Image: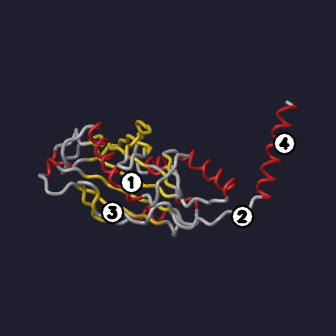
């Protein structure tokens, strides 16, 4: 018990000294991503979307939100793909960036699976992203209820670092603030698409895709988006 108390006291003392003698953190400055989503990404063409009122209400006023709906044009509707991309860039208030799982739960989605996936970029770099399998019930026009499934894929980008983990993002912020006098202005890009294998093409306006095909489509879009989103090459944490 005494040993634990001594260790705890020593850790507290070190923390106080670090806070006392470390230089003031640099301001957030420029974000690690430009505040835009490209109109064309691979075989997809993006149409601008406005952030929802609820998003604007929940996030601080200086948060930057950019959204596009990406479609594969020039195909019959039963061969088309659709994915919704979003980019959130923090302002001065750190509440702008948070675990997307919280918002999804508030929107009525249930998370059925969470895993990290790796994307090989054309540059040879590996981008690690988090893939959330989500589900909720929807009411069709004929009054029947149907489980709607989707995949929500996201990652966090700092000044020169990228991570699929919110906990890791917070630890990076603490480390770089104390050791390197850097205050990351974080952003998080995300892409969401429905799984359509329980819908007809006329119901969804898209081709029939199972989970594996939907994830493959999302990762393909991210492979085209990532080099345009991140200003510089990013390092592993």
Q: What element carries label 4?
A: helix
Q: Pointer 4: residues within 10 angstroms few (<14), some, or many (20+)?
A: few
> Is 17 above or below relative to 211?
below
The residue where tag 4 is placed is: 9
Q: Residue 136 occupies which quadrant of the picture?
A: top left
Label 2 – label 3 distance at C-alpha: 36 Å
Q: Is mark 1 on a helix, strand or loop?
A: helix
Front one among 208 and 29: 29
Please report contact status of discs 1 and 4: CB closer than 8 Å, yes or no. no
Please report contact status of discs 2 and 3: CB closer than 8 Å, yes or no. no
Q: Residue at x 20, y 49 (%)?
A: 204
Mark sitting earlier along the chain (3/4)? 4
Mark sitting earlier along the chain (1/3)? 3
The residue where tag 1 is placed is: 226
Q: Nearer the viewer, mark 1 or mark 4?
A: 1
The residue where tag 3 is placed is: 38
Front one among 32 and 149: 32
């Amino acid at each position: 018990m005494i040993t634990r108390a001594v260790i705890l006291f020593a850790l507290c003392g070190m923390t106080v000294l670090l806070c006392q003698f470390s230089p003031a953190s640099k301001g957030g400055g420029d974000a690690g991503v430009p505040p835009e989503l490209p109109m064309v990404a691979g075989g997809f063409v993006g149409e601008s979307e406005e952030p929802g009122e609820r998003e604007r209400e929940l996030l601080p006023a200086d948060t930057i939100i950019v959204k596009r709906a990406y479609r594969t044009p020039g195909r019959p509707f039963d061969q088309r793909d659709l994915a919704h991309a979003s980019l959130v860039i923090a302002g001065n208030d750190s509440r702008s960036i948070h675990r997307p799982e919280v918002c999804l739960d508030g929107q009525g989605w249930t998370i059925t699976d969470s895993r990290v996936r790796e994307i090989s970029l054309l540059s040879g770099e590996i981008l690690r992203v988090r893939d959330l399998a989500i589900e909720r019930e929807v009411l069709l026009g004929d009054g029947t209820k149907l489980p709607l499934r989707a995949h929500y894929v996201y990652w966090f980008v700092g000044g020169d670092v990228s991570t699929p983990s919110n906990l890791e993002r917070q630890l990076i912020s603490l480390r770089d603030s104390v050791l390197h006098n850097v205050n990351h202005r974080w952003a998080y890009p995300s892409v969401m698409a429905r799984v359509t294998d329980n819908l007809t093409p006329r119901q969804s306006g898209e081709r029939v895709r199972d989970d594996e095909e939907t994830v493959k489509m999302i990762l393909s879009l991210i492979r085209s988006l990532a080099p345009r989103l991140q200003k510089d090459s990013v390092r592993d944490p």
